[in-house]
Amino acid sequence: MEWLDSIVLPQSADHLTLLRVVGALALIVVYPYLATVVGSTAISLFYRRRANRGDRLAFRFAKDVAESGTVSRSAGALLGLAPLVALVFIYAQLGKGIEDGAATYLVVALLFALAGLSLVYSYRNSIGLRRLFDETEFIGGAPPDLREDARAYADEYRDLNNMSGGWGLVFALVASYLFVAGASVLAFPEDRGSSSLLLYVFTSGKIFLRYLLFLFGGLALAGSLVALRMFYWEGGKKSIETAYAEYAKPRALKIAAFFSLALPALVAGNLFVYPERSLSETVFALSFAALAAILLAFHFLYLGLRRADKFGGGWAYPALVAAFAFLLVGEMTASGEATERNSVMLDREYQAYFAELKGEGGGVEPANGEQIFGTVCAACHSFENKIVGPPYVETLPKYEGDKAALKAFILNPVKVNPEYPPMPAQGLKPNEADAVAEYLLKTYESDYK
């Protein structure tokens, strides 16, 4: 989307670091919220279908799950849409000059989320009204006309409930998939170029694995949040009868425990698919911290299920949120590692921009080809080994004695070898490209020829 380029401002290295911090905070807000909404809506629809067979407790549970998982009517804007808007701008800034499609995916995710959350909240409201009118039929002594009106309203809200619940979940699933894709692609530099295509999003095993973590995490978060809000928060709801508590509490905790079991394997799998360039000690440490938080959450769920514990089960939801917070900070850290050379380029553009504004941009500064190679080129290229691009010993022979051609390619790269991804333009100035070309040719002739 070209308009995204128009909102990007020059950024220094410090500004980019601050943007990553703000981006991590926005992810920590919106990711658990969207995951919980998707999980709670799916669980509610499942139990609503069971209620169609005459299980009145299942319908009540479906209503409570929908209400607990969506938190409140204002939560959709504050926890879902506002952070997504912020992430669009943040990823547009961080991905400037990178052909990855992250900000584009987030824009489309925002549109689907707007539609999905509207329908989910309509489902939340209509299921409560539907239950109210359904139950009116069972009120002893209610006059026939009241029962007839209640039946008519129940039928009306049944249609609205069926439509809004199913389509709300579909839109929320699409929104969350694109959101996960947009938040992930910066960490995979070897996929740049192809990652900007919609086909990549729906065929990439890396994105699908991350989405499985989102889905299983959402179902675990939804179950634990229902248990927390109904039975633990401030002593639990006072109006819950014993029969319903015995029905709802173990189901909420079992749902959370069942889907939590898969989370350690999914966390490990997602760590495994990171490219070496995106990994660091911080990413590993945060992943292990997330695993510890997941195990702690499972321990709290066990307490709630097996030991008649009055408070332990209530800690499962905060522990799961903490686990995803660690993972999301790790994701932003990995993206920072993968875009380090792009950040150097953006910082250089920022310094040049402000030097020009101050009237200090006259003349052409000498460029150090070896230094530019180390900060811009070395992440993807080596003289002898394949990294992202081919080794220079295979490509430089055709440029011997023709530095101008190599300089032209560096300034305006085109795809040559179908076995490698296209090289994105690095934003180098002509004198910088000339210095890099000279350094490459001299090093090749002296050390590798």
Image (tube, helix red, strand yellow):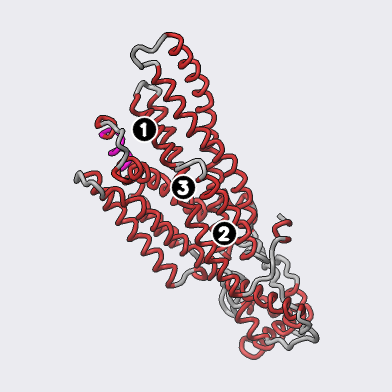
Say which quarter of the image contains residue 352. Answer: bottom right
- Return the mark for residue 185: 2
- Name the dominant secondary structure of the magenta segment: helix
Does dot 1 land on a helix, a strand or a loop?
helix
State the residue position of label 1: 61
| Image position, residue 175 (x, y; %) | 56, 45
Q: In the displayed image of the protein, which residue is found farthest to the top?
A: 144
> Where does the magenta region start and end?
246-253
Within 10 Å of the Cα at label 2, are there few (<14), some (14-19), or many (20+) other Cα atoms?
many
| Image position, residue 153 (x, y; %) | 50, 19
Q: Nearer the viewer, mark 1 or mark 2?
A: 1
Which quadrant holds the N terminus? bottom right
Look at the numbered discs 3 and 2 and tell me whether their residues touch, using CB distance below 8 Å.
Answer: no
| Image position, residue 208 (x, y; %) | 50, 51
Within 10 Å of the Cα at label 3, are there few (<14), some (14-19), or many (20+) other Cα atoms?
many
- Return the mark for residue 35: 3
